[in-house]
Amino acid sequence: MSGYVPNNRNERPAPTPAPYNGDFHRQAPRPLEGTAAQSSSCLVGLRFVWDNGECLGANLPYSLTPAAGNPVRGSLDARSSLIQTIQGREYEAQLLADTDVDSDIASARAELQAALDEILAAERAEAARLQAIQDQRSALSNYVHRRLAAGKGFFLGAWGLLKTAKEFSDLVNPFTTFSNALRSAWQARASEGETWLAAYNRQFSAEQHRELVEALGFDPSSITREQLAEAFELACFIYEDGPSKAMLGRFAVDYAKAQNVEEIAEFSGGALFEIVLAALLIVFTGGIGLAARGAASVSYLDKLARLGNAFRRLGAALKRARIRRGGRARGSGTGARTVEVERPRDVLPGTLAPMDGSDIRGSPRKGRNKPPEPLPEAEGRPHSIIERPGRDGQYTTHNGDGTWKQYRGSGQDHGGIPRPNVKEAGKNTTPDGREIIDKGRVRPARPDEIPRG
């Protein structure tokens, strides 16, 4: 018969239902043949920023891994964000998942150590001629070499970035303004779509940039504000890396010893910033300007250039490592969230202390043991002035409220109080209620006040 379809119900019997449980309203659902279980999915949105609100950067690779499924790989967009649909609900996100940051850092540290060793070898090779070189230096150059303990101007002077007293004097205000603008921008909360460099550019004008670069002896057109700020950013990342900081600390001490500086204080952030700044200035400019002025660093420009390149590579590797360590997130279900990555703390570059005249040959000296006046660029904040470095030297600490104390490591005893001792000025109240600063009283020095070395 045309169109006849045989009945095959006996060949494919229906599944046997479960026995009736006596409750019409509580029957188990019957399975439907030929249907597959429906899979669930969710929409994930993540944004990665520094803890000041600034975007980490575009095009950073990420891996988004569902609890059950293959990783989804991609790159962050211009807002440091990702939006992906994944199967299931649980997920784990990781930035720079395939980057071996530890190997990058180890390699960069080795490159930095090699560059530092090369500079030290060059300095030690000149040891026999060092005294003659020191005799030929200007009074200012010898001054900044003796003041390593203060961490102010030593490396800028040693590598030929400071040559004359006029340049040193001209540099004080621009460098202080530069330091303040950098720290203020670094600490500021970023507004939407603005980087910390943009905030810095608002605060440090093109004219201030020109003054600073000219005072350092370079053509202002050879280095940008962004390049100067890059030195600060690199110094911040390097300063929080213990092994790198220790490496630079050893270099600072060994370099000073090679130049016959016998007393060296504890390594400081200011000295690190000067090393980074000096090396990167030479990298950014190719040394243009130094050769014309006969700077001390010309003899090993190539070594300083390698040092600057090593700083750039190490800083970039440490930055990637911080992003990888902090750029991870776990979550569940559809939703958007922001992941903050902690930035390094800012490095206080330190201001360049103006000369008080006591270290320049032929200039009048201050009275014996008279404490120096507070530095104007300290703007009333507590600070110390190293008059002579070392355990047998002398320094004065101004407390910011008009009081001060002066450590004297050597010299004549004072009324039966042997050296080292401390002369400390305090506050007194007059009968009419006025507060005055006394002339100071001498007492024995406490262990924490005595310089090491």
Image (spheres, rainbow, N blue to C red):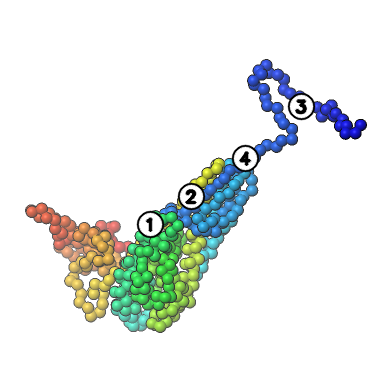
Q: Earlier in the sequence, mark 4 or mark 1?
A: 4
Residue at disc 4, secondary structure: loop
Q: CA distance from mark 3 to mark 2?
A: 53 Å
Residue at disc 3, secondary structure: loop
Q: CA distance from mark 3 to mark 1?
A: 71 Å
Q: Earlier in the sequence, mark 1 or mark 2?
A: 1
Tag 1: residue type? Answer: Ala
Residue under pointer 2: 339
Q: Earlier in the sequence, mark 3 or mark 1?
A: 3
Residue at disc 1, secondary structure: loop
> Crowding at label 3, few (<14), some or many (≥20) Cα neighbours within 10 Å?
few
Residue at disc 2, secondary structure: strand
Q: Quadrant of the N terminus?
A: top right
Whether pointer 2 and pointer 4 mark residues with C-beta atoms closer than 8 Å, the reply is no
The answer to whether residue 443 is above or below residue 36 is: below
Q: Is residue 434 left or right of residue 362?
A: left
User: Which label number is shown at residue 15?
Assistant: 3
Q: Residue at x 51, y 46 (%)?
A: 336
Tag 2: residue type? Answer: Val
Q: Residue at x 52, y 49 (%)?
A: 46
Choose between 141 and 22: the one closer to the eye.
22
Q: Residue at x 86, y 32 (%)?
A: 5
Looking at the rendering, which quadrant does residue 419 occupy? bottom left
Residue 184 in the image: x percent, y percent?
35, 60
Residue under pointer 4: 40
